Image: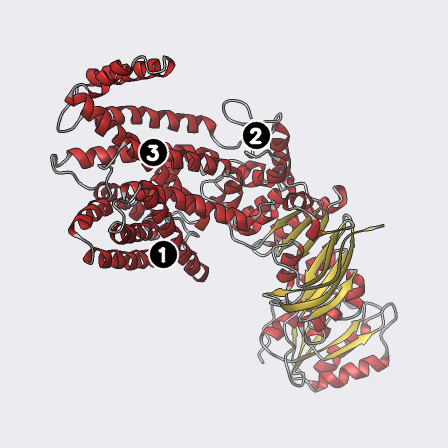
Amino acid sequence: MKAGNSQIAKEPGPVIRLGNRSRFTLVILILIALLIPALLLNVNIGSVPIAAGDVFRMIWDAIRYGLANLFTNGGFADKLQSVTGSSTESQILFTIRIPRILLAAVLGGALSVSGYLLQVFFRNPIAGPFVLGISSGAKMVVGITLVFLGSFFSGVSSFTMLAAAFIGSLLVTAVVLLFSQKVRNMSMLLVIGIMVSYICGAVTDFCITFASDHDVANLTSWSMGTFSGASWQNVGTALLVCIPGTVAALLLSKPIGAYALGEGYAQSMGIRVRPFRVLLILLSSLLSACVTAIAGPISFVGIAVPHITRSLLKSSKPSFMIPATFLCGAVFCVFCDLIARTVFAPTELSIGTVTSVFGAPVVIYMMVNRRRGMED
Amino acid sequence: MENYFKTDGLAVGYNGRILIHDINIELEKGKILTLIGPNGAGKSTILKSITRQLETISGTVFIGSKDIVSWSPKEMAKKMAVVLTDRIRPELMTCAEVVATGRYPYTNAFGKLTPRDAEAVREALELVHALDLAGRDFMTLSDGQRQRIMLARAICQEPQIIVLDEPTAYLDIRYKIELLDILRGMAGQRNVTVIMSLHEIDLAMKISDYLLCVKGDTIDAFGPPDEILENHTIEQLYELQDGSYNLLFGSVELTKPEGPPRIFVVAGGGHGISRYRELQKRKIPFATGILFESDVDCQVAKELSDHVVTAPPFEPMTERQFRKAADLLTACEAVIDAGTPAGTLNHYNTELIRLAEDRGIPVYRGKDAEVPV
């Protein structure tokens, strides 16, 4: 396949296009073009506004001295310190805002890819970690861990949180899978997801009832979903899980594309269907668990973003969909976080509130406009 | 010729329970095998088992000289392609993209299509006369078009064997013929072995080199269509009444009207068929004659009436046949003259009409004559 549209042309036969590569490139460029101002706005706006010029200067200095520091074995440590920690502004920039936007971008992307993988798995565009109750399951196990383990140990590490969220995700996924064997109908699958989230919610509430005030405060703010707890450590964890996770998904593009024709055909093309399905679920759960562990359950991103991306690309080619979905999720969450922080400043909304406002209508639109033949 | 595809004591079923056992098929390369049998007889179960979608319970399936269990999924995909009954609903995939999935076993880890792959896609689309559909969204196609694309997908996989489960199910007659022609071409020109299930017995008879009659626990029969035809296997297979299925034409007539004949039809040379069918629809039992055994009217009449007076072909009709027909005619309420021209061999038919007129039995003539019974 050469640059531009891959074509099968044979004189004088018609041209056959396999995947519109130029459209993909265009969508990626637009998303990047949106992401850059979104990142800048996010850094720029807040209770302490920082001028864009200052932002650029400080980041440039930080990169410059950081690199120099690296190559001179600590020779520029003082300079670096003076950039990142000298003023209130630079402290806000480097310890609060930059980690937060990076976190929003990475987790938003990961959550969207997680949703996309679930949609592939169920061959159903309405699937997503939140609507299927998977996020709630993660929240439940994290809640239990925070309340019961938190009182034994001084604190719960982010790795423990991640493990708890992963176990919770897998638990609910297993339950949903069990039911999905019985019902092939996608509305029923949704109803089951909602019911499962209620059950998980009830268990979480139960934990809260018996938790200490300190734990409740922690749990409540976390369970609403927020990027406000961002730290460089969180960013590191997120990058460490989400980037390899997304790359792994990208490596699965070929079987994902064939799987769109159903298990029977996938098997006939030489896919080992069972291990492939397990891999899909594990990857999707890992990504959504990472998001839930760090930022709490975030609604509708996993379902709305892949849909938006698909409409933009006008293709469901996985090798296009996965990077574009990640990028689109990043843009979506960075914007949503901006709104959450600024609209009612200084009061901050939970990220879930904002993503619901934008995500839920997309889901309703999909339900209403789903094509004939999609019902069964 | 050496057998390319073979099953040896194959038993298939679901969840370890045997549905059909002792399936023994031997098939040379480039031959077409069709599975026929009533609904629920297990045709799909057999097809799923030989494509490894379903685990076999016992016995072996061979492709070449190798047990298919020993093929890796990828090797298997290069040997065998399928067209299933599954209704697929890929989102936002063009037909060319759907067909291109057939290249799966040949592309690299990222599924990158080489010019060679793209050419295979184009060729496959051309073969099923669907090149103009290449850029269309698969979901916007009609059932007939979808089936052609799925066939192109299977062809594009460049298999040695194509397995199709009811490929004609959603197709109108024109597409049915077109599809079967393509399969015949694949078998003849590319030496591809075709194994499929069909509902249309007549088409199965015409396209297949071998038929496998599937019903219940064991295989009813396996062999070339002629052999199956001679042994009246078809009637037993589908539990049909004698005669209602015309083996020669592969056509089906509805059930005979019951009771003593009320109308006598004087016919021959194909003039009687439409009258017989009209009487069948009105559930009026009838008698007919005198028909030469080689006459097309005779073929249909025998399926729709128990009272058919026949004469051996290429001989003039005889007095004896006339008397037999006259007995039937005089017992009827009315006579239809189907309009068969009189000639030297069938002049007794003219006599029959004259007899009716003499006895005062009403005679109705011509194509459109209403028969008030």
Question: Label 1 sits on what residue type?
Answer: Ser
Where disc 2 sits, the SS reads loop
Q: Are marks 2 and 1 on the same chain?
A: yes
Please provide percent x and percent y for residue A221: 20, 45
Q: Residue at x 72, y 80 (%)?
A: B306
Same-subunit check for callouts 1 and 3: yes
Q: Nearer the viewer, residue B291 or B92?
A: B92
Mark 2, residue position = A14
* Disc ID at residue A106: 3
Disc with the residue nearer the chain's start (1 vs 3): 3
Q: Are marks 2 and 3 on the same chain?
A: yes
SS for tag 1? helix
Q: Position of residue B147 (x, y in %)?
A: 57, 48
Specify the amino acid type for callout 3. Val
Mark 2 and mark 1 in contact? Answer it, CB < 8 Å: no
Eyeballing the image, is B189 above or below A1?
below
Residue at 81% across, 80% down: B322
| Labels 2 & 3 near each other (Cβ < 8 A) | no
Circle 1 residues within 10 Å: few <14, some 14–19, many ≥20: some
